[in-house]
Amino acid sequence: MRGKFITLEGIDGAGKSSHLTFIAERIKQRGYEVFTTREPGGAPLSEKLRTMLLHEKMQPDTEVLLMFAARREQLLETIQPALERGTWVICDRYTDSTYAYQCGGRGLPEGRVQVLEQWVHGHLQPDLTFLFDAPLTVARERLEKGTANPDKFEREQSEFFAKVRDAYLRRAGQYPQRIKVVDSSRTLQAIQADLASYLDAL
Ligand code: TYD
Protein backbone atom coordinates (compact mmCIF):
# COMPACT_ATOMS: atom_id res chain seq x y z
CA MET A 1 0.00 0.00 0.00
CA ARG A 2 1.17 3.51 -0.81
CA GLY A 3 2.52 5.47 2.15
CA LYS A 4 0.82 8.61 3.42
CA PHE A 5 2.16 12.03 2.57
CA ILE A 6 2.16 14.59 5.41
CA THR A 7 3.31 18.21 5.10
CA LEU A 8 4.14 20.82 7.74
CA GLU A 9 3.45 24.50 7.14
CA GLY A 10 3.54 27.85 8.90
CA ILE A 11 5.19 31.26 8.90
CA ASP A 12 8.85 31.46 9.93
CA GLY A 13 8.98 31.26 13.72
CA ALA A 14 5.67 29.38 14.07
CA GLY A 15 7.63 26.38 15.38
CA LYS A 16 6.80 23.78 12.75
CA SER A 17 10.22 22.13 12.45
CA SER A 18 10.40 21.36 16.16
CA HIS A 19 7.35 19.06 15.85
CA LEU A 20 8.72 16.98 13.01
CA THR A 21 10.46 14.47 15.29
CA PHE A 22 7.34 13.92 17.39
CA ILE A 23 5.25 13.26 14.28
CA ALA A 24 7.84 10.87 12.82
CA GLU A 25 8.14 8.93 16.10
CA ARG A 26 4.37 8.59 16.44
CA ILE A 27 4.13 7.07 12.98
CA LYS A 28 7.12 4.75 13.55
CA GLN A 29 5.47 3.48 16.74
CA ARG A 30 2.62 2.21 14.57
CA GLY A 31 5.11 0.13 12.59
CA TYR A 32 5.50 2.25 9.45
CA GLU A 33 8.72 3.32 7.76
CA VAL A 34 9.12 7.10 7.79
CA PHE A 35 11.12 9.38 5.51
CA THR A 36 11.49 13.03 6.52
CA THR A 37 12.55 15.80 4.18
CA ARG A 38 12.19 19.51 3.54
CA GLU A 39 11.43 22.04 0.83
CA PRO A 40 12.98 23.67 -0.96
CA GLY A 41 15.58 20.89 -0.87
CA GLY A 42 15.67 17.17 -0.18
CA ALA A 43 17.42 15.94 -3.33
CA PRO A 44 21.02 17.02 -4.12
CA LEU A 45 20.06 19.42 -6.95
CA SER A 46 17.09 20.74 -4.95
CA GLU A 47 19.46 21.56 -2.06
CA LYS A 48 21.61 23.61 -4.47
CA LEU A 49 18.50 25.46 -5.59
CA ARG A 50 17.61 26.00 -1.93
CA THR A 51 20.87 27.85 -1.34
CA MET A 52 20.09 30.19 -4.24
CA LEU A 53 16.45 30.63 -3.24
CA LEU A 54 17.22 31.46 0.37
CA HIS A 55 20.16 33.76 -0.22
CA GLU A 56 19.96 35.45 -3.62
CA LYS A 57 17.78 38.33 -4.65
CA MET A 58 15.70 37.41 -7.71
CA GLN A 59 12.55 38.29 -9.61
CA PRO A 60 9.33 36.86 -8.08
CA ASP A 61 8.69 34.81 -11.24
CA THR A 62 12.19 33.33 -11.08
CA GLU A 63 11.63 32.49 -7.42
CA VAL A 64 8.43 30.57 -8.06
CA LEU A 65 9.88 28.74 -11.08
CA LEU A 66 12.93 27.63 -9.09
CA MET A 67 10.71 26.52 -6.18
CA PHE A 68 8.80 24.24 -8.53
CA ALA A 69 11.97 23.02 -10.25
CA ALA A 70 13.34 22.02 -6.83
CA ARG A 71 9.98 20.41 -6.00
CA ARG A 72 9.79 18.38 -9.21
CA GLU A 73 13.35 17.11 -8.76
CA GLN A 74 12.80 15.94 -5.19
CA LEU A 75 9.35 14.52 -5.94
CA LEU A 76 10.77 12.20 -8.60
CA GLU A 77 14.03 11.45 -6.78
CA THR A 78 12.86 10.87 -3.24
CA ILE A 79 9.20 11.49 -2.30
CA GLN A 80 7.41 9.45 -4.94
CA PRO A 81 9.70 6.37 -4.72
CA ALA A 82 9.33 6.38 -0.92
CA LEU A 83 5.53 6.57 -1.07
CA GLU A 84 5.45 3.78 -3.63
CA ARG A 85 7.52 1.57 -1.28
CA GLY A 86 4.87 2.12 1.37
CA THR A 87 6.99 4.56 3.38
CA TRP A 88 5.25 7.53 5.01
CA VAL A 89 6.76 10.85 3.97
CA ILE A 90 6.83 13.95 6.16
CA CYS A 91 7.88 17.07 4.29
CA ASP A 92 8.74 20.34 6.04
CA ARG A 93 6.87 22.73 3.65
CA TYR A 94 5.31 22.02 0.26
CA THR A 95 3.10 23.85 -2.25
CA ASP A 96 0.96 25.56 0.42
CA SER A 97 4.16 27.51 1.18
CA THR A 98 4.24 28.74 -2.40
CA TYR A 99 0.64 29.96 -2.20
CA ALA A 100 1.36 31.62 1.14
CA TYR A 101 4.80 33.18 0.45
CA GLN A 102 4.87 33.82 -3.30
CA CYS A 103 1.15 34.61 -3.79
CA GLY A 104 0.21 35.96 -0.34
CA GLY A 105 3.54 37.56 0.52
CA ARG A 106 4.86 38.66 -2.86
CA GLY A 107 1.53 39.16 -4.63
CA LEU A 108 2.05 36.66 -7.46
CA PRO A 109 -1.30 35.71 -9.10
CA GLU A 110 -2.55 32.31 -7.89
CA GLY A 111 -3.33 31.25 -11.46
CA ARG A 112 0.41 31.05 -12.20
CA VAL A 113 1.00 28.72 -9.27
CA GLN A 114 -2.02 26.60 -10.13
CA VAL A 115 -0.55 25.90 -13.58
CA LEU A 116 2.80 24.87 -12.11
CA GLU A 117 1.17 22.82 -9.37
CA GLN A 118 -0.83 20.91 -11.97
CA TRP A 119 2.29 20.26 -14.01
CA VAL A 120 4.57 19.29 -11.16
CA HIS A 121 2.28 17.28 -8.88
CA GLY A 122 -1.31 17.47 -10.05
CA HIS A 123 -1.56 13.75 -9.32
CA LEU A 124 -0.05 13.93 -5.85
CA GLN A 125 -1.46 16.06 -3.03
CA PRO A 126 -0.64 15.65 0.67
CA ASP A 127 -2.96 13.38 2.65
CA LEU A 128 -2.65 15.62 5.69
CA THR A 129 -1.14 19.07 6.32
CA PHE A 130 -0.45 20.63 9.69
CA LEU A 131 -0.55 24.42 9.61
CA PHE A 132 1.32 25.64 12.70
CA ASP A 133 -0.17 29.00 13.47
CA ALA A 134 0.89 31.63 15.99
CA PRO A 135 0.28 35.37 16.32
CA LEU A 136 2.88 37.41 14.44
CA THR A 137 4.39 38.81 17.61
CA VAL A 138 5.03 35.31 18.98
CA ALA A 139 6.55 34.11 15.70
CA ARG A 140 8.77 37.20 15.36
CA GLU A 141 10.06 36.80 18.89
CA ARG A 142 10.92 33.11 18.31
CA LEU A 143 12.57 33.95 15.03
CA GLU A 144 14.73 36.67 16.53
CA LYS A 145 15.82 34.40 19.41
CA GLY A 146 16.49 31.30 17.32
CA THR A 147 18.22 32.58 14.17
CA ALA A 148 21.79 33.83 14.13
CA ASN A 149 22.04 34.27 10.33
CA PRO A 150 18.57 35.06 8.96
CA ASP A 151 17.94 34.11 5.31
CA LYS A 152 16.22 36.26 2.66
CA PHE A 153 12.73 35.33 3.84
CA GLU A 154 13.47 35.65 7.56
CA ARG A 155 14.67 39.21 6.94
CA GLU A 156 11.26 40.26 5.58
CA GLN A 157 9.18 42.78 7.55
CA SER A 158 6.10 42.04 9.69
CA GLU A 159 3.71 43.19 6.92
CA PHE A 160 5.07 40.45 4.67
CA PHE A 161 4.48 37.79 7.33
CA ALA A 162 1.00 39.16 8.06
CA LYS A 163 0.11 38.58 4.39
CA VAL A 164 1.71 35.12 4.40
CA ARG A 165 -0.24 34.15 7.52
CA ASP A 166 -3.55 35.41 6.06
CA ALA A 167 -2.93 33.43 2.88
CA TYR A 168 -2.25 30.28 4.92
CA LEU A 169 -5.43 30.69 6.96
CA ARG A 170 -7.46 31.29 3.79
CA ARG A 171 -6.12 28.02 2.35
CA ALA A 172 -6.96 26.18 5.57
CA GLY A 173 -10.53 27.51 5.17
CA GLN A 174 -10.60 26.25 1.57
CA TYR A 175 -9.29 22.76 2.37
CA PRO A 176 -10.51 21.98 5.90
CA GLN A 177 -10.37 18.21 5.34
CA ARG A 178 -6.66 18.25 4.52
CA ILE A 179 -5.25 21.26 6.39
CA LYS A 180 -5.44 21.14 10.18
CA VAL A 181 -4.63 24.41 11.93
CA VAL A 182 -2.60 23.84 15.09
CA ASP A 183 -2.34 26.80 17.46
CA SER A 184 1.37 26.67 18.21
CA SER A 185 1.35 29.41 20.84
CA ARG A 186 0.10 26.80 23.38
CA THR A 187 2.10 24.39 25.55
CA LEU A 188 4.05 21.54 23.96
CA GLN A 189 1.72 18.98 25.59
CA ALA A 190 -1.40 20.62 24.15
CA ILE A 191 0.14 20.80 20.67
CA GLN A 192 1.33 17.20 20.79
CA ALA A 193 -2.10 16.00 21.95
CA ASP A 194 -3.67 17.60 18.85
CA LEU A 195 -1.02 16.15 16.55
CA ALA A 196 -1.46 12.68 18.04
CA SER A 197 -5.22 12.68 17.57
CA TYR A 198 -5.01 13.80 13.91
CA LEU A 199 -2.29 11.24 13.20
CA ASP A 200 -4.17 8.41 14.90
CA ALA A 201 -7.23 9.25 12.80
CA LEU A 202 -5.13 9.08 9.63
P1 TYD B 1 12.36 27.10 6.44
O1 TYD B 1 11.54 25.94 6.02
O2 TYD B 1 11.73 28.02 7.39
O3 TYD B 1 13.74 26.52 6.91
P2 TYD B 1 14.65 27.01 8.12
O4 TYD B 1 13.86 26.58 9.31
O5 TYD B 1 15.89 26.21 7.85
O6 TYD B 1 14.82 28.50 7.97
O7 TYD B 1 12.91 27.98 5.20
C1 TYD B 1 12.51 27.91 3.93
C2 TYD B 1 12.05 29.27 3.45
O8 TYD B 1 11.61 29.15 2.11
C3 TYD B 1 10.88 29.83 4.25
O9 TYD B 1 11.18 31.15 4.65
C4 TYD B 1 9.73 29.89 3.28
C5 TYD B 1 10.37 29.82 1.93
N1 TYD B 1 9.55 29.09 0.94
C6 TYD B 1 8.83 29.81 0.00
O10 TYD B 1 8.86 31.05 0.01
N2 TYD B 1 8.07 29.15 -0.93
C7 TYD B 1 8.02 27.78 -0.98
O11 TYD B 1 7.34 27.21 -1.86
C8 TYD B 1 8.79 27.04 -0.01
C9 TYD B 1 8.76 25.55 -0.03
C10 TYD B 1 9.53 27.73 0.93
Image: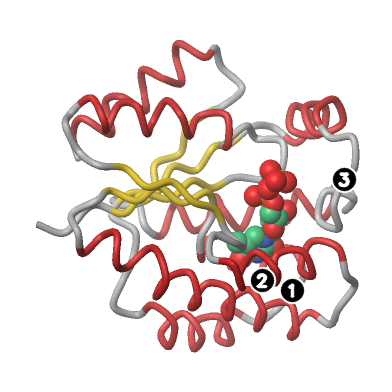
The disc at residue 2 is none
Give the labeled residue for mark 2. Answer: 103
C-alpha span from label 1 to label 2: 5 Å
> Does 45 sit above or below residue 191?
below
User: What residue sits right under mark 3 in the picture?
Assistant: 150
Q: Quadrant of the C terminus?
A: top left
Report the side of 29 relative to 139 (left or right).
Answer: left
Disc number for residue 107: 1
Q: Is residue 190 above or below residue 27?
A: above
Residue 71 coordinates in the image, percent (x, y)? 52, 72
Q: 10 Å neighbourhood of mark 3: few (<14), some, or many (≥20)?
A: some
In the picture, residue 22 is in which quadrant?
A: top left
Amino acid type at image mark 1: Gly
Tell me the quadrant of ligand 1. bottom right
> Are discs 1 and 2 less than 8 Å apart at CB?
yes
Element class at badge 3: loop
Give the SS element for disc 1. Answer: loop
Instruction: Tell me residue 96's x, y (percent).
Output: 52, 61
Q: Amino acid at mark 3?
A: Pro
Q: Residues within 10 Å of mark 2 (few under 14, many from 20)?
A: many
State the separation of the CA atoms marked 3 and 1.
22 Å
Q: Nearer the viewer, residue 186 or 38?
A: 38
> Horizontal placement of 84 versus 155: left or right?
left
Quadrant in which residue 139 is drawn:
top right
Please tell me whether residue 38 is drawn above or below residue 24 in the rendered image.
below
Label whose residue precedes the other's in the sequence (3 or 1): 1
Residue at screen point 65% across, 83% down: 65
Q: Residue at x 70, y 78 (%)?
A: 108
Can residue 113 be seen here? The reply is yes
Q: Nearer the viewer, residue 157 or 21?
A: 21
Q: Position of residue 17 (x, y in %)?
A: 58, 36
